[in-house]
Amino acid sequence: SDYGVVTPYPYVLSDEDSDGIVYLTNSLVKHDITGGRNIPSLKLIPRNIVIGAGCRRDTDPDAFINFIKEEFELAGLDIRALSSLASIDIKRDEPAMVLASEYFNTERIFYTAEEIREVEHLFQNSDFVRETTGAGAVAEPCAYLAAGSGGKLLLSKKNRNGMTLAIMERTIAGIE
């Protein structure tokens, strides 16, 4: 065709007449999608990934940043797709949250315990988290709220050394 083959990633494109390939994905691409042909390709990365996060007070910002990077890689996600970091409002000034958001150039979104309690029933809750924050969970509900209607949970809550992370994908209008 005049426009080449249009197919959902991760399938290899096979139109021999294509002059190049443009693909849209938030995934890490570790193989050649050109089918071995020497043609130009352009990867477009939608910034449609949000994380819900929590951490202990005074968590090392570098450890938090590395935790995010490692979980994205393990999930096969391109870190450049990260658009938002969401958490509970009592973490608004937490250095690890602020510096991670600046490092990844993302918006920071904060929710009150009351807002989180409205959706926390959808996720596993913790008495400790409730006593500490006023909400039974933080990472997954915050990711859920930030992703909005139609969001898809890509990574359930992961914990490491007092840091917690959940990853969700926002729906992009017109793209499934």
Image (cartoon, rainbow, N blue to C red):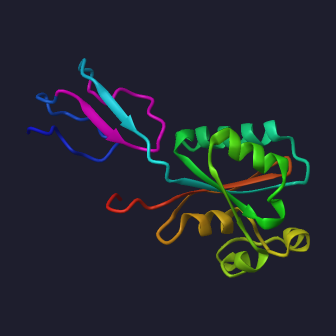
Relative to 111, say whether 76 is above or below. Answer: above
Query: Which residue corresponds to the image point at 15% horizontal and 33% vertical from the top-left?
Result: 15
Residue 155 placed where, x, y %?
60, 54
Query: Which residue corresponds to the image point at 68% horizontal and 82% vertical from the top-left?
Result: 118
Relative to 61, say whether 110 is above or below. Answer: below
**Magenta part of the protein: which range?**
19-35
Quarter-of-image position of residue 38 = top left
Of the pair 131 and 43, the residue shown nearer to us:
43
Residue 26 placed where, x, y %?
46, 44
Apparent side of residue 44 relative to residue 12 in the rendered image (left or right): right
Q: Residue furthest left?
A: 1
Apparent side of residue 42 relative to residue 150 in the rendered image (left or right): left
Apparent side of residue 127 relative to residue 86 in the rendered image (left or right): right
Query: Which residue corresponds to the image point at 32% horizontal and 61% vertical from the top-left?
Result: 174
**Main SS class of the magenta portion in the image:** loop
Specify the quadrant that holds the N terminus: top left
User: Is residue 38 highlighted in magenta?
Assistant: no
Q: Residue furthest top?
A: 38
Quarter-of-image position of residue 5 = top left
Query: Which residue corresponds to the image point at 75% horizontal and 66% vertical from the top-left?
Result: 138
Residue 176 placed where, x, y %?
35, 59
**Count of labels shown?**
0
Q: Is residue 10 visible?
A: no
Relative to 40, say whether 48 is above or below. Answer: below
Of the pair 105 and 58, the residue shown nearer to us:
105
Residue 120 placed where, x, y %?
70, 76
Q: Is residue 151 visible?
A: yes
Of the pair 12 and 38, the residue shown nearer to us:
38
Apparent side of residue 11 relative to residue 140 in the rendered image (left or right): left
